[in-house]
Amino acid sequence: MKKILGMMLSLALVAVPLKSVAEPILQRIERTGTIRAGAWKDAKPFGYVNEKGEWVGYSIDIMRVIQSQVETALDKPIKLELVEVDTQNFLDHVRDRKVDISCGPTSFTWNRERYIDFSISYFVTGTQVLVKKGVTIDSVEELKTKRIGVEANTTNEAVLKTLAPDLQVIVVNSRSDGFAKLQQGVIDGYAGDGILLEALKNSAPNPEEWDIIPNDELVHLEAYACVLPQDDSHWRDLVNYSILRVIQGYIIEDPEFSKMFAGWFGEQGVSPYPEAILQDYFQGILDSKERIPTTAF
């Protein structure tokens, strides 16, 4: 009887399919010599194609710092392969390991955390509304009288629906589509992250004809982070170390990182942004982590 039970148990174990174990990301990068990185092409200043046809952005610069750190860790040259993603597919690309990392205008949410992991934050903004100059929205009740465009499946959409459940929300396909509908009068306002709205406004032929409201506060804080496949702590640690180098470098005014931030967010940068907000936010992150030795700069 014991022999029969033993045979049955052995057969049962053979019949149970074993869960496949994903190859560790750093191991795959070392084997292939390539980091597959998800990036946006319509999210200025985080990822976009400039007038020279170059794929550039603050998030892409962040991933190049990560690339450099990987090269140091593996002691070999590593290629950064950019893969285009957007609001609708970036999570699937990371979850399904089509990319090793995706850095863009991506906010942390607990629902997203169920499928992927987040790095530490590398930028902060918040939900605001782009409107025709002179338009005011001074209360939630007044907001309800407006037709507000927003991209589907974004934290901005969730914020609006929480703030005013019966709001006239009109789904748009992209940021450029939202701005086009606003210019055509199809919607009264386009809701998005303030830093991205600022870039849209500044890229218009007549930026002085548009306002971003409220202009002195954020409706809801949006902390941007890179998105990573789940359960790979070695890869996440390296990414976090790289981002912390950028943050600490900015705070201590390291020339490399001061130049990076000035180019994207300085007064003469691509998308000027209040320096005090970034300094306070990054100082808070830095204070919660062990400082990186200054010899790393």
Image (cartoon, rainbow, N blue to C red):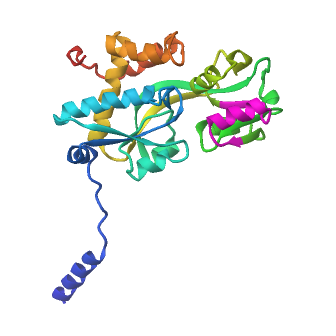
Residue 162 in view (yes/no): no
- Residue 215 placed where, x, y %? 67, 16
Residue 82 in view (yes/no): yes
Left or right of residue 69, residue 179 in this image? right
Which residue is at 22% across, 46% downward? 27
- Residue 64 placed where, x, y %? 33, 29
Which residue is at 70% across, 18% downward? 206
Q: Residue furthest front?
A: 52
Magenta-colored stretch includes residue 3:
no
Q: Looking at the picture, does residue 120 appear above or below residue 81? A: above
Q: Looking at the picture, does residue 33 appear above or below residue 193? A: below
Magenta-colored stretch includes residue 172:
yes
User: Which one is in front, 132 or 10?
Assistant: 132
Which residue is at 43% across, 29% downward? 59
Left or right of residue 272, residue 253 in this image? left
Q: Image quadrant of residue 162?
A: top right
User: Which one is in front, 66 or 80?
Assistant: 80
Q: Image quadrant of residue 177?
A: top right
Left or right of residue 3, residue 129 in this image? right
- Residue 141 placed where, x, y %? 81, 29
Q: Image quadrant of residue 201?
A: top right
User: Which quadrant of the figure contains the N terminus?
Assistant: bottom left
> Number of marks in the image?
0
Tell me where the magenta segment starts and ends, as one range. 171-191
- Residue 80 placed where, x, y %? 32, 37
User: Which quadrant of the figure contains the C terminus?
Assistant: top left
